[in-house]
Structure formats: C-alpha cells, structure tokens
Image: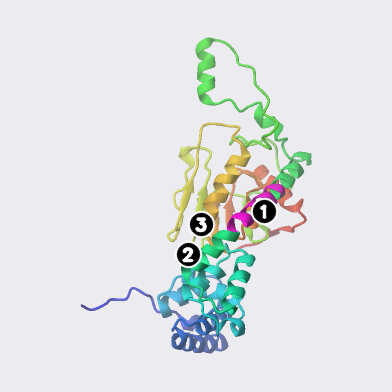
Amino acid sequence: MTNISTNLQFDYSSLDEETCEFVQQQTVEIRCLIKHTVEDIFEIGQKLIQVKKRLKYGHFGKWLNSEFDWTERTAQKFMNVAKRFDCEHCSELEFAPSALYLLAATSTPESARQEALVRAKAGEKISWSKAKEIKRKYAKAAQKVTKKTKAKQLETSDKLLAKNSSLVEIKNFSSQSTSSQESNQTQKNGKEKESTPSKQEIIGLLPQQESLRRKSQLVEPNCWWQLGENLLYCGLPDSPEFQQQLPQKIALSLAFPPSRREWPATFGQQTQSVLLFSTIYQGLDLSLFRELIKCSLELCTLEKEMIVVYYLRDPLLPLLIHNLECRSLIAEPDAIRCEQAIIAWGKTGQKAETIEIR
C-alpha cells in the first residue's frame, strides 16, 4: 500500500538567501540526529531553538510539518531538554529519552530535575517511571506554593482595581446580582426582594454584561493595545480587523458572549480547544471564574501558545494569561471594559501602549 503524505512543501522562496541556507542546513543536520540518544536530543533541541529564532511568526510550525511531520508540541520537547539540561553533564548519564522529556517539561519543578541528576550521577538509570515518581514528589509541594503566589498576585490586582477611581467599584455589582429565577419568584409573590450585600470573603464579582454607560477617556473604538504578549482589540470579535489577525494555530479559544445571539461566528480553522461560557446569571464569583480559566489554560495549552479571547468579562484576564506564560488575542467591543484591563495591567508596573496593526 502506498503512503500518501498530506504534508505541504515548505516555501523556502519566502525566506531571504541567508536564512534559507541556514534553515536548509539545519534541516539536513536534524535528520541525521534523529536517533534519540541523550546527546542527540540535546543537539536537536538547540538547532530547533536557533531555527525558530530565525523564522517569522507562523513559519516554524509549517517548517516542522513539512520537513519532519512534527507538531510544535513534539519540537517543544526537544527544545525543553536543550533549555533545561547541560549536554556535557547528561550525555554520559543513563536517562531514557522519555524521562528527559518529562523532566524537562515546564510543569516539572527544578528540584525534581536536580534530584534526577544526582541519582543519575550516582549510577542509577532514570527511566520514565522513575522520572514520573520524582516529579510527583516535588510537584505537590510546588503546586501549593504556586497557588499561593498567583492568588496573592490576583488579590493585589483586585485591590488595585477597586481603589482606582476610573473603574466601577466591584461592590456595585453585588447589589445587581439577582438571578432571573429569583426575579421571577419575586414577581409571583408580588413583593420586592431587598438586595443583599456580597459576602466579605468574596474578593470580587463578575461584572454584568451590559455597557457601563460612560465614555472611555482612554480607549477609542477599533484600536489595538499591547499588554506584554497580549493584544487587545476594542471591537467586535467577528470584525474583519480582528479575524485577519487570528494565527493559523490557536491552542485555546475562550468565549464569554453577552448573550447566545452574540456567539462568535468562527473560532479559527486551527483552534485545538474551545471553552464557551454564557449565562443569564449576574454577580458570579470572580475567584471561581478565574479558577475555571486557569484550569482550562493548564489543561489545553503549553508555554507561549496562543489563546484567543472573545469578549473580556474579567479585566484581570490578561494578567492571568501572562502569569501562566501564554500569549493572547483579545476582542472586546466595550471601551470601558478595555480601559479596565489596560489600567489593571498598568497598575502592576507593566507597560501598556496603543499599536497600529495592518
């Protein structure tokens, strides 16, 4: 039976002469190295890192698929090993390739890698199962520390939001957080139910979907803002201006439409995972909402992968994405919500600026 390759030929003609020669040479050398010894894995990773730096955004994945039939996730394993291990110290040690990939992953604590190295230098062969055991030992302790650190960062950002006079006070949302079920029951009983204040332990409540009814002094419609590696567009998600910027590969799309009538028409051709959240209820607990997003990011994305956000329910979402080491494209038509995100970002000491995208 004849195998039919579905890989497209990589377009080397789009590269300048120097880059073309370099990438073709690395391609040949990588092919010769695919033997999966420790030394080869390290060298492949180094070469992949060099190629990725030379190619423009979006070309790296095409090159991998065309030349090696690899995904970027596969390449990331090699690059992680090159970044986190010293070839001279590891080449003579007995590491199973699968163990190296596991220990070099971004989710593996540095302390786990150090223990594995110590044990390997003592003559122990580190298999995948031993690497997993070592990782599990340190992951639980690291997870507790990470949760406390990130929770503190988000709590600090929440306090900055609440103190800023140009933002709607978070407390205001609690007085309007009656669900539709409660409203219907009130109408049946003919009595008006008094609003109850939010519990003190709730840091903040998710804002209602309708516009905040004031004109932004900072954000103009149809403009772009750069917040670190997050790009924020003040406009509709289905607009051509935003859709044209969607990359070929999207690790995760997050959609929080105001209503079902406003669901995005498309999530991009190469979206790997989608989380769409829409509800009639108002005044949702922000901490629970952020935990939902955090779990989605950890489950469906790798470091530096692209996330697309349709409608910005939480002004701290760009900070959360940044803390989890991902990149994002965000579309939000309400200028006030964009303003909230920009101010929250700036309050952490990071730069926020308008940019032109063509």
Determine if residue 310 is in view: no
In the picture, the disc for residue 248 is 2
Residue 8 coordinates in the image, percent (x, y):
38, 75
Per the model, the C-alpha gap separating discs 2 and 1 is 35 Å
Per the model, the C-alpha gap separating discs 3 and 2 is 11 Å
Instruction: Give the labeled residue for mark 1.
Output: 145
Above or below — where is 254 with respect to 26? above
What is the span of residues highlighted in magenta in the rendered image? Answer: 139-152
Above or below — where is 264 with respect to 34? above
Q: Nearer the viewer, residue 135 or 20?
A: 135
> Could you tell which of marks 3 and 1 lies nearer the N-terminus?
1
Residue 230 coordinates in the image, percent (x, y):
63, 58
Residue 62 coordinates in the image, percent (x, y):
46, 74
Q: Given the image, on which type of amino acid does mark 2 rest?
A: Gln
> Could you tell which of marks 3 and 2 lies nearer the N-terminus?
3
Instruction: Give the labeled residue for mark 3.
Output: 243
Determine if residue 50 is in view: yes
Q: Is residue 143 magenta?
A: yes
